Image (tube, rainbow, N blue to C red):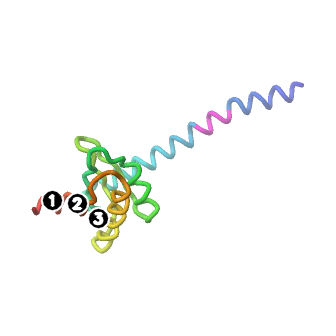
Amino acid sequence: MLLAVILMMVVVLAVPAFLVLTLRRWGRGEEQVEERLRAPQTHKVSYLVPEGEDPAVLRGALARAGFVTAMDTSGDERLFVECEETDRHRVREVIEEVERGSSSTAARVLFEDERAQR
């Protein structure tokens, strides 16, 4: 009986502690990715997410395509996608595929540096 009580106490204390530590580690990993993507030397594109679009859907599609992303919500919802210049077209294709399936207009995807040139 005493062994069962001790085992139960260990489980009650250990499981929440394990979850907290795991979530903390995951959060730190996300912070490191965001810091890396905000650094000026990182090769990336910046995409202004249209109003009404769910950035989580875009992030999921880009992750499945092998791209690392981070959100910048310090104003407009902006999605940073880490990619080399040669992969820029692939990022555009993934975003366009997602937007075609939504209610938004299927206009050509422009990244922020391209909008500045217009």
Residue under the image location 11 percent in, 63 percent down: 117
- Image quarter of residue 116: bottom left
- How far apart, in angstroms, are the residues tagged by discs 2 and 1? 6 Å
Q: Is residue 59 left or right of residue 47?
A: right
Disc 2 vs disc 1: Cβ atoms closer than 8 Å?
Answer: yes
Residue neighbourhood size for the residue with mark 3, other residues' Cα within 10 Å, grouped as few (<14), some (14–19), many (≥20): some
Of marks 3 and 2, which one's residue comes earlier in the chain?
A: 3
Q: Identity of the amino acid at label 1?
A: Arg
- Image coords of residue 31 (percent x, y): 39, 47
For mark 3, what is the residue?
43
From the viewer's perspective, is residue 41 above or below residue 70? below
Q: Secondary structure at mark 2?
A: loop
Residue neighbourhood size for the residue with mark 1, other residues' Cα within 10 Å, grouped as few (<14), some (14–19), many (≥20): few
Q: Identity of the amino acid at label 3?
A: His
Farthest residue, direction right: 1
Q: Is residue 28 magenta?
A: no
- Image quarter of residue 60: bottom left
Residue under the image location 45 percent in, 45 percent down: 28
- Image quarter of residue 59: bottom left
Farthest residue, direction bottom: 86
Camera-nearest residue between 102 and 48: 102
> What span is in magenta?
14-19
Residue under the image location 33 percent in, 67 percent down: 93
Camera-nearest residue between 28 and 67: 67
For mark 1, what is the residue?
115
Q: Is residue 12 left or right of residue 35?
A: right
- Image coords of residue 118 (percent x, y): 10, 62
- Image coords of residue 29 (percent x, y): 45, 50
Q: Identity of the amino acid at label 2?
A: Phe
Of marks 1 and 3, which one's residue comes earlier in the chain?
A: 3
